[in-house]
Image (tube, rainbow, N blue to C red):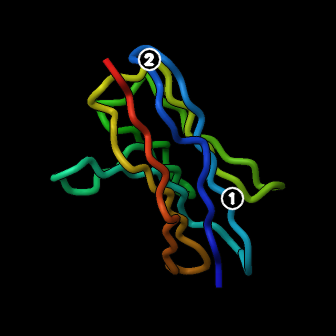
Amino acid sequence: QVQLVESGGGLVQAGGSLRLSCVASGNILSIDALGWYRQAPGKQRELVALIARGRNTIYADSVNGRCTISSDSARNTVYLQMNSLKPEDTAVYYCRWVIGGGYEYWGQGTQVTVSS
């Protein structure tokens, strides 16, 4: 069993920055993909950024150039650095890990609110 704990969300003014973290604990044998998703009120959950083994990093068009996903294997942590935040970035952000042959785990979510 794997547990994910996110942190780093909060309230920030437009133009500001936040760094989200997602720490994994448990039996992590291999990582197939690491990703960040977000869900705004009344909208479907959408991909923000994804690192997949053997593939290029993917960013949503809406955040490309403003966000960077990275990972620290020694700390079992994936990060999302978000710069030049906009009010439309307001959402609950979730991390997702795909581990060991396709097992999928989600974090509990962290709220990001960007004021204009």
- Residue 52, compared with residue 68, is above or below; it is below
Residue drawn at (56%, 66%) of the image: 32
Between discs 1 and 2, the one toward the N terminus: 1
- Residue 99, compared with residue 73, is above or below; it is below
Quarter containing the N terminus: bottom right
What label does residue 84 carry, if any?
Answer: 2
Q: Residue furthest left?
A: 42
| Amino acid under disc 2 | Ser
Residue 26 quadrant: bottom right
Residue drawn at (43%, 50%) of the image: 93
Residue 25 quadrant: bottom right
Whether label 1 touches label 2, CB < 8 Å: no
Q: Is residue 40 left or right of residue 85?
A: left
What label does residue 88 carry, if any?
Answer: none
Quarter containing the C terminus: top left
Secondary element at tag 1: strand
Residue underneath mark 1 = 23
> Residue 41: horizontal and vertical position, in percent?
22, 50
- Residue 40, compared with residue 65, is above or below; it is below
Compare residues 43 and 99 and report the one nearer the observer.
Answer: 43
- Residue 56, compared with residue 44, is above or below; it is above
Residue 59 quadrant: top left
Q: Is residue 6 left or right of residue 64?
A: right
